[in-house]
Amino acid sequence: MGSKATDAQRLQELLYEALETEAGGIQIYEAALECAQNEDLKKEWGEYLEQTRTHHEVLLGVFEDLGLDAGARTPGCEVVAHLGQSLVEAMRMAQTRATPSAAERVACECVVLAETKDHLNWQLLGHFAERQSGRAAEVLKKAHDEVMKDEDHHLFHSKGWCRELWIDALGMPAVLPPPEEVKQVETAIGASRAEQSRERMLKRQR
């Protein structure tokens, strides 16, 4: 553990990374939607895009409540911005060099990568809010409670889409929409159970 001043600096760094992740997420979903072929996936990502815009607004509110400058840049958020732009560029590359279905899979992988970081950010902010006291903890708990269910949904469902699109591309029977979507999974345990149920779902499709 560091000093209180150092701990506060690290929390601020995490907040700046989280804000940049949400801002980049908007661009990532806009690019991913251009790659989507499956109509159910288009609808899903359209909803995620709007939710990500809301999450960005929630974090801007956190910055205002904590007296932080949302326009400031930190080393961490610069790295996050670079990674997000790289994911957008990867999707653009796939659109120009690959088949539409391959570009859709690339987009899905990019979404999973982005949502993995996003999910981690909110997990950590929630962890802080649960174990600390004071104004920052109160503000973060409120924001976390507002956002975390969406973040669980985004990550677990996107991983399911990615898996099933790849299974379909490999010439094997796929469950589309994926089990995570059909069963409205919101937890890691639920995601595991949904994946395990896919063989039963395939039998029902035959």
Image (cartoon, rainbow, N blue to C red):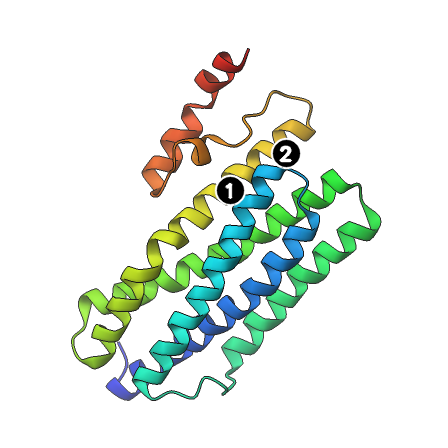
Q: Name the element at disc 2.
A: helix
Q: Position of residue 89 (x, y in %)?
A: 72, 62
Q: Nearer the viewer, residue 34 or 140?
A: 34
Q: Can residue 196 be seen in this view?
A: yes
Sequence-first tag of 2 and 1: 1
What residue sits right under mark 2 in the picture?
166
Side of 189 relative to 79 (left or right): left
Side of 11 relative to 115 (left or right): left
Q: Can residue 11 be seen in this view?
A: no
Q: Which of 41 and 94 is in front in this view?
A: 41
Q: In this view, does 158 lie above or below 193?
A: below
Residue at left offset 55%, top offset 38%: 161
- Looking at the picture, which amino acid does disc 2 mark? Trp
Q: How far apart are marks 2 and 1 (CA)?
A: 11 Å
Q: Is residue 93 above or below residue 70?
A: above
Residue at left offset 60%, top offset 20%: 173
Q: Where is residue 108 in the image (x, y as percent from the top left)?
A: 60, 46
Residue at left offset 40%, top offset 64%: 121
Q: In this view, does 175 lie above or below 204?
A: below
Q: Name the element at disc 1.
A: helix
Q: Position of residue 157 (x, y in %)?
A: 47, 42
Q: In this view, does 195 lie above or below 145?
A: above
Side of 37 relative to 77 (left or right): right
Circles 2 and 1, Cβ within 8 Å, touching? The answer is: no
Residue at left offset 61%, top offset 53%: 110
| Rendered-image quadrant of the N terminus | bottom left
Side of 85 relative to 73 (left or right): right
Query: Pointer 2: residues within 10 angstroms few (<14), some, or many (20+)?
Result: some
What residue sits right under mark 1 in the picture?
159
- Looking at the picture, which amino acid does disc 1 mark? Lys
Query: Pointer 1: residues within 10 angstroms few (<14), some, or many (20+)?
Result: many
